[in-house]
Image (cartoon, grey):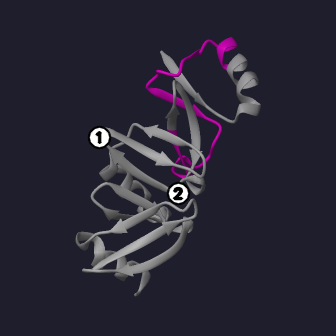
Amino acid sequence: MKFKLICSKKNEYTLRKQLENAGFDISDDADFVISEYHKPKDFLMGRIHETYEVLPLNTILYIETFGKEVIAHTQDQQYVLSEKLYQLEEQLGEQGFIRVNKSQLINIKHILEINPWFGQKYNITMKNHTEIDVNRTYYKRFKAYFGI
């Protein structure tokens, strides 16, 4: 049986050797996960090129769909996620992520500015200066969330 190891780069070599010596087969394409993190809802796994990395939720500015891929954006990187956007919306709602349009979730902790826009819309500027629109479908929910 194969296991995927999720840990910090600092501990990876030591943990991998200990687990392999104990008879575990460690592989990045495994279905089962061994993690050094205590709270799995504090991070996501993202792929950049062919490498999987741990993404702490507090580093993610926004998540969007682009074609069939779901992409998490941090300040300086983009990671492909395996979850669907609607699954992430359900999973991350309590962690400060809110759906603002059909294809994007934002992390409210990384909002730089909120500007009202024409026709029941808002324009949001994230800390990396990306501009995201809240469309009419999500307008009322957005207003209620922030009490505006």
On residue 35, the disc is none
Q: Is residue 106 magenta?
A: no
Q: Secondary structure at mark 1?
A: loop
Could you tell me residue 22's position as x and y percent? 66, 15
Residue 118 vs residue 15: left or right?
A: left
CB under 8 Å between discs 1 and 2: no
The amino acid type of the residue labelled 1 equals Gly
What residue is rendered at 62% in x and 12% in y? Answer: 23
What residue is rendered at 24% in x and 80% in y? Answer: 119
Tell me how far mark 1 sits from mark 2, CA to CA: 19 Å
What residue is rendered at 54% in x and 62% in y? Answer: 129
| Residue holding disc 2 | 61
- Quadrant for the C terminus, please: bottom left
Disc on the earlier residue, 1 or 2: 2
Could you tell me residue 88's position as x and y percent? 38, 51
| Residue holding disc 1 | 67
Toward the viewer: 132 or 71? 132
Looking at the picture, does residue 111 appear above or below residue 117? above
Q: Residues within 10 Å of mark 1 (few under 14, many from 20)?
A: few
Residue 90 vs residue 28: left or right?
A: left
What residue is rendered at 66% in x and 19% in y? Answer: 19
